[in-house]
Amino acid sequence: MSPFARLVRLARANVHRLLARLRPEARPAPAPPPAPAPAPAPDDPAAALERAIFALNARLVEGKKQVAVAVADEKHVAKLVAQATAEAAEWERRAVLAIEQGDEALANQCLVRKREHAARAAGHEAEWRAYKAAADRLKASLRALSDEVEAHKREQVRLRARARAAALRAASPLEAYFSLAGRRHRAAGEGAFVLEPRAPGGRPVEVRLAADGAVSFSAALGLLPEGEAAAKLALRLLETNATALVHCAYGVRDGVVVVAATRALVDLGPNEVEAILSDFDLAIARHVRDMPPAHNARSN
């Protein structure tokens, strides 16, 4: 290849490299900015309390071990004190016997040994007092730690109760009242609920919330008997309405005996709902056996 051809080829290569640098698609894409670090979520008081109780319990376990060791050391040193005191008394007894036998040299030796053991007993007693003081301090710390754990547990119970109350408030007011009354229930449409029977052989209670804020409670007991039995049953139901039931009343709807009550939602609360349902329980238990079941009847 001639020198001129090589020069032209080199020039073309330089031009291509220059054009490649000028094309936008040839440029490397800028690196995306680093994602901001997520903001730390606010700590849940219940979770923080749970962690604190866990940590305190761990310290409590370790503290109990330390107290056990300190008490064991205290008892061990107390035995050494008793042993040295007993040995000092024994050498004193021997010294007295030696004096009675006229052996003064032996008596002096016994007294020397007695003083040694007495001094050892005094040293062990000082050591025992130190161990006892340390054990007492550890016991006091352990009691304070245990009190702190109990206080945290009480606070945990309070937080759980507050969370449960908040959950109930967030739900439908009626559902909250049913839950507080301990009644199992299920939704049966918008503003309608069915409360399951509390006892075997009972009847479900239907609750409906109307657009005007009226809340109706009703339970179908059974078909109204025919003939004279119907008149007798009606009389008993009316007497019960007047003497026993306060928050609900018997009635007849489409040939079906029902228990019913109606209240304004603004007038209802947990106590009122519980009282109404207690009357329903009484009414159902008294007369449901007097009527054939209304298989196809439904209270509205």
Image (tube, rainbow, N blue to C red):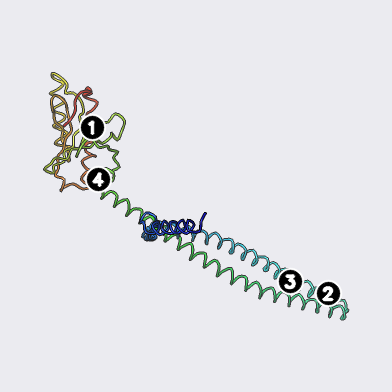
Q: Do we see residue 26 in this rendering? A: yes
Furthest-top residue in this view: 227
Name the residue type under label 4.
Tyr
Residue beneath disc 1:
284
Which label sits in the foreground, 1 or 3?
Answer: 1
Q: Foreground residue, 41 or 18?
A: 18
Residue 177 drawn at (x, y percent): 25, 45
Q: Is residue 48 left or right of residue 217?
A: right
Residue 298 drawn at (x, y percent): 19, 28
Q: Residue at x 61, y 70 (%)?
A: 132
Alpha carbon separation for disc pair 3 and 4: 74 Å
Residue 127 versus residue 5 in the image, above or below: below
Mark 2 vs 4, N-terminal side = 2
Mark 4 vs 1, N-terminal side = 4
Is label 3 in contact with label 4 (beta carbons under 8 Å)? no
Q: Foreground residue, 284 or 180?
A: 180
Q: State the SS at label 1.
A: helix
Mark 2 vs 1, N-terminal side = 2
Q: Do we see residue 245 in this rendering? A: no
Number of marks in picture = 4
Residue beneath disc 4:
177
Residue 284 versus residue 36 in the image, above or below: above
Q: State the SS at label 2.
A: helix
Which label sits in the foreground, 4 or 1?
Answer: 4
Residue beneath disc 2:
97
Name the residue type under label 3.
Ala
Residue beneath disc 3:
84
